[in-house]
Amino acid sequence: MYSRIQDVAALVGRIGIAVVFFAHGLEKWNSGIDATADMLGGVGIPLPTLAAIFLIAVEVVGPILFVVGLVTPLVGIGFAISGLGAVFSVHLEAGLTGEGGYELVLVLALAGLALGFNSGRLALDHVLFGRRKKAEEPVS
C-alpha cells in the first residue's frame, strides 16, 4: 500500500511542477522567440536565440511529457537546466529569499530533476520501460 501512495505522490508532484513550468513556458511562447531571446541576451545568456528555443521547448512540451510520465529523466534535466540558468542569470543577486529571490526557482528546478528520475509507476516510462526491465532481472 505504501508504494501506491508513493506513486500517487510522485504523480501529484509531477503535475504541480509541470503546471508552473508550463505557465512560464506559455509566457515565453506568447512573447515569441525574438522577445524571449532579447530578454535572455539582456541578462547575459550566450546564444540567446538558441536558448529561447530550448526554454520554450522545455517549458511547453516538457510539462506535457512530465504529466504523462514520458522521458521524465530527460525532462527533469531540462527543468534543472532551465531553473538553474534562471537562478544564476537572474535571481542570484537578490539572495535566497525576499523580492526576486531564487528559493522558488531552485526548488522547482531540483524537484523537477528529482521527480524526473523518480517518476513512480503511474508514468508511461514505467509502463513502457520499467516492466520490461523488471522482467529481465534474474530472480535470486
Image (cartoon, rainbow, N blue to C red):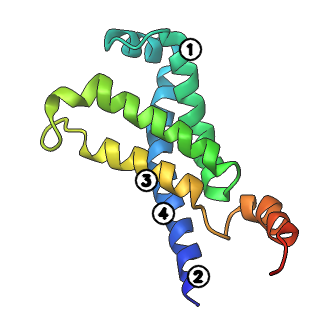
Few, some or many C-alpha atoms within 10 Å of disc 1 (few <14, some 14-19, many ≥20)? few
List the residue tagged with mark 3: 111
Tell me the SS state at disc 3: helix
N-term-proximal mark, 2 vs 1: 2
Image side of residue 107 versus residue 140, left or right: left
Mark toward the viewer: 2 or 4:
2
N-term-proximal mark, 3 vs 4: 4
Q: Residue at x 79, y 65 (%)?
A: 127
Residue type beneath disc 2: Ser
Whether tag 2 and tag 1 are in contact, CB under 8 A, the answer is no
Few, some or many C-alpha atoms within 10 Å of disc 3 (few <14, some 14-19, many ≥20)? some
Distance from the alpha carbon under mark 1 to that under mark 3: 25 Å
Tell me the SS state at disc 1: helix
Whether tag 1 and tag 4 are in contact, CB under 8 A, the answer is no
> Farthest front residue?
140
List the residue tagged with mark 2: 3
Few, some or many C-alpha atoms within 10 Å of disc 2 (few <14, some 14-19, many ≥20)? few
List the residue tagged with mark 1: 50
Whether tag 3 and tag 4 are in contact, CB under 8 A, the answer is yes
Classify the position of the N terminus by image quarter: bottom right
Residue 63 at x, y = what percent?
57, 47
Tell me the SS state at disc 2: helix
